[in-house]
Image (cartoon, rainbow, N blue to C red):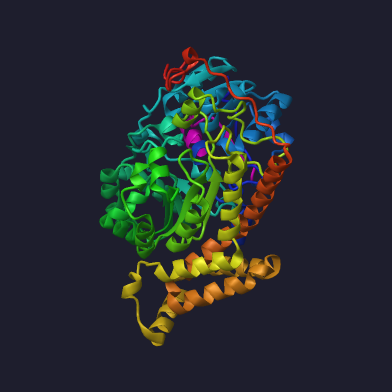
């Protein structure tokens, strides 16, 4: 039997969602933010003699010839890709090609993917050999379920970066660890990957960077870890080697990642990340209110001054983006004002603000289930007729404690205030003034106009030709497609050049992101206002609640812990 032709299809993100960063990517000369690390890692696990093609449906169309070539299609993604993943399955059925679906969404909601020929639930490392053996024995349907949290990531192969067209993407992802030590009630990461972070070896990570470097890639590399500091001991062992690797290779990469905000208390780790050229960090703030944080089991955020923590991260050269959520049980009526004050005081330019969404297979969802507050269809990503197709708007998929209208008013108000152009770019200016760099913290920089001019000259010389092109592309987009931003953008840029020239690149980066989140926030506000109007007219009808008899509760792990079958 000849080896099968494998077509990897990465599903589209919903076109009107927080996750569709086409505009921001276009400002930097790319098509999308990042490629699918999961799919190209699975590709590396397949037998080397199996022919493989890769198509990202966010960047290119799938031709009939591609499907005619394929003996199987491998696909899968996250909740904001649910609709197109199901569309890929239907496309495969129409062309008579078996669809193999894996990834986090099908792992959390396998019943939604009943049309898939083959389901792969959990981490692929544990079941890929069984899948290959089953396929080679002639099986074209089946279900493979990995035992939870047991994958040995030190045996995970180098992803097939060679399948990618680097020019399509703003950044390329790598992964150091899986899992998070915390127990936030609303989070599905600990359900998918566990609370004991598993890490790759240092040599393994450097080999992945060597592979990217050898393929000619230069630019942003994103550590896709859900909490890079989840295993602090392993990170401290890795970072000095990463610093040395960067120095030896002439600093070909700059890094971004996600981490819990308690990273701010580890000055040694922050200094090493600065020296390794980490420049951007996503943190989950969720709420400025300690009672709310404690109620949702995010107690790690209650043990520190959060505003000061953000300033500390900024001073080490990393600009912060952050997540915020409205709709928690313990929040109060003034939470919107408090959230805006926090964002302004901490000078976080880009904030992902959303409505609480009871994700499938989380502590929150199970609690709401037990309390009889969970709506039917809670695991379907987009509601019918919504202008915005993601959980930012289709959240509150349960009966909240606070009046729904009040939460929606707070949500629309927060978005309107933080993304008003003058307010946003003023925040960019404040962030830039406090941003450190590899050349030193703000207090260590040259003083006086001569020192500032000299620093600006040195910064300009250090910017690559590609970065200059991206900067000019962004300036053209602002000038010709987003003219209302021209004056506030110009003021923020001038302020940055005067106060901290080394932060110009950061200011340009967050401006590029604003080209997406600014217009997107206005679409969200419009949709939220439509929901408020429906409540005021009496047109809004509560969806049916999911009935859950006490003896029907499915405990976590009962279904997905049974091993491959």
Q: Foreground residue, 110 or 299?
A: 299
Q: Position of residue 84 (x, y in %)?
A: 65, 35
Q: Residue 196's quadrant in the figure?
A: top left
Q: Position of residue 425 (x, y in %)?
A: 55, 67
**What residue sits 43% from the left and 51% below the top?**
288
Residue 404 visible (yes or no)? yes
Give x and y (percent) for residue 88. 66, 32
493 to the left or right of 199: right
Question: In the image, is residue 46 part of the stretch drawn in magenta?
Answer: yes
Q: Residue at x 71, y 45 (%)?
A: 533
Q: Which quadrant, please, contains the N terminus?
A: top right
Whether residue 217 appears in this view of the structure is: no
Range of magenta residues: 40-58
Choose between 191 and 90: the one closer to the eye. Answer: 191
Q: Is residue 286 above or below residue 482?
A: above
Quarter of image, res 177: top left
Q: Looking at the image, which residue is at 47% across and 26% down? A: 366
Residue 419 lies left or right of residue 444; in this view the side is right
Q: Is residue 321 left or right of residue 263?
A: right
Task: Please say if 258 is above or below 109.
Answer: below
- Name the outermost residue toward the bottom: 450
> Between 481 and 289, which is closer to the camera in this rendering?
289
Which residue corresponds to the image point at 49% horizontal and 32% vertical from the top-left? 48
Residue 94, compared with residue 19, is above or below; it is above
Count the numbered circles shown. 0
162 or 75, nearer to the observer: 75
How far across and how far down the image is residue 495, in percent?
50, 76
Is residue 209 shown left or right of residue 243?
A: right
521 is within the stretch colored magenta: no
């Amino acid at each position: 039997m000849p080896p099968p032709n494998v077509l990897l299809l990465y599903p589209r993100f919903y076109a009107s969602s927080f996750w569709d960063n086409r505009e921001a990517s276009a400002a930097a000369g790319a098509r999308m933010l990042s490629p699918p690390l999961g799919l190209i890692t699975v590709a590396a696990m397949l037998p080397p003699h199996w022919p493989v093609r890769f198509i990202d449906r966010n960047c290119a169309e799938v031709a009939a010839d591609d499907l005619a070539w394929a003996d199987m299609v491998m696909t899968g993604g996250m909740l904001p890709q649910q609709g197109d993943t199901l569309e890929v399955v239907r496309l495969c059925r129409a062309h008579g090609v078996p669809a193999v679906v894996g990834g986090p969404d099908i792992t959390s909601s396998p019943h939604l993917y009943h049309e898939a020929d083959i389901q792969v639930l959990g981490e692929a490392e544990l079941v890929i050999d069984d899948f290959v053996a089953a396929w080679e024995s002639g099986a074209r349907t089946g279900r493979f379920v990995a035992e939870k949290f047991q994958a040995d990531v030190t045996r995970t192969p180098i992803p097939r970066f060679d399948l990618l067209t680097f020019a399509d993407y703003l950044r390329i992802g790598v992964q150091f660890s899986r899992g998070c030590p915390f127990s936030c009630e609303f989070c599905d990461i600990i359900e998918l990957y566990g609370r004991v972070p598993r890490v790759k070896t240092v040599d393994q990570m450097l080999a992945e960077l060597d592979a990217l470097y050898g393929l000619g890639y230069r630019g942003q590399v994103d550590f896709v870890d859900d909490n890079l500091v989840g295993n602090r001991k392993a990170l401290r062992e890795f970072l000095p080697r990463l610093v040395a690797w960067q120095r030896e290779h002439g600093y070909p990469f700059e890094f971004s990642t996600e981490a819990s905000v308690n990273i701010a208390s580890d000055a040694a780790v922050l200094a090493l990340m600065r020296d390794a050229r980490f420049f951007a960090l996503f943190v989950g703030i969720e709420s400025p209110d300690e009672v709310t944080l404690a109620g949702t089991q995010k107690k790690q955020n209650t043990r520190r001054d959060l505003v000061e923590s953000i300033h500390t991260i900024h001073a080490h050269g990393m600009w912060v983006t952050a997540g915020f959520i409205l709709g928690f049980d313990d929040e109060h009526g003034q939470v919107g004002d408090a959230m805006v004050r926090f964002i302004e005081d901490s000078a976080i330019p880009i904030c992902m603000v959303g409505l609480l969404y009871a994700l499938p297979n989380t502590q929150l969802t199970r609690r709401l289930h037990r309390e009889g507050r969970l709506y039917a269809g809670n695991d379907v990503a987009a509601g019918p007729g919504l202008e915005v197709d993601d959980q930012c708007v289709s959240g509150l998929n349960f009966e909240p404690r606070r009046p729904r209208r009040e939460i929606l008013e707070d949500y629309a108000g927060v978005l309107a205030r933080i993304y008003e152009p003058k307010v946003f770019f003023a925040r960019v200016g404040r962030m830039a003034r406090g941003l450190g760099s590899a050349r030193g913290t703000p207090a260590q920089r040259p003083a006086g106009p001569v020192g500032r001019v000299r620093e600006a000259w040195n910064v300009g010389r250090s910017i690559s030709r590609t970065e200059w092109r991206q900067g000019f592309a962004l300036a053209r987009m602002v000038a010709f497609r987003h003219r209302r931003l021209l004056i506030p953008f110009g003021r923020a840029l001038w302020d940055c050049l005067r106060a901290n020239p080394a932060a110009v690149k950061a200011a340009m980066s967050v401006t590029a992101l604003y080209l997406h989140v600014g217009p997107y926030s206005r679409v969200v506000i419009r949709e939220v206002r439509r929901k408020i109007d429906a409540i005021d007219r009496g047109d809004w009808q509560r969806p049916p609640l999911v009935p859950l008899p006490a003896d029907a509760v499915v405990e976590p792990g009962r279904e997905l812990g049974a091993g491959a079958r």
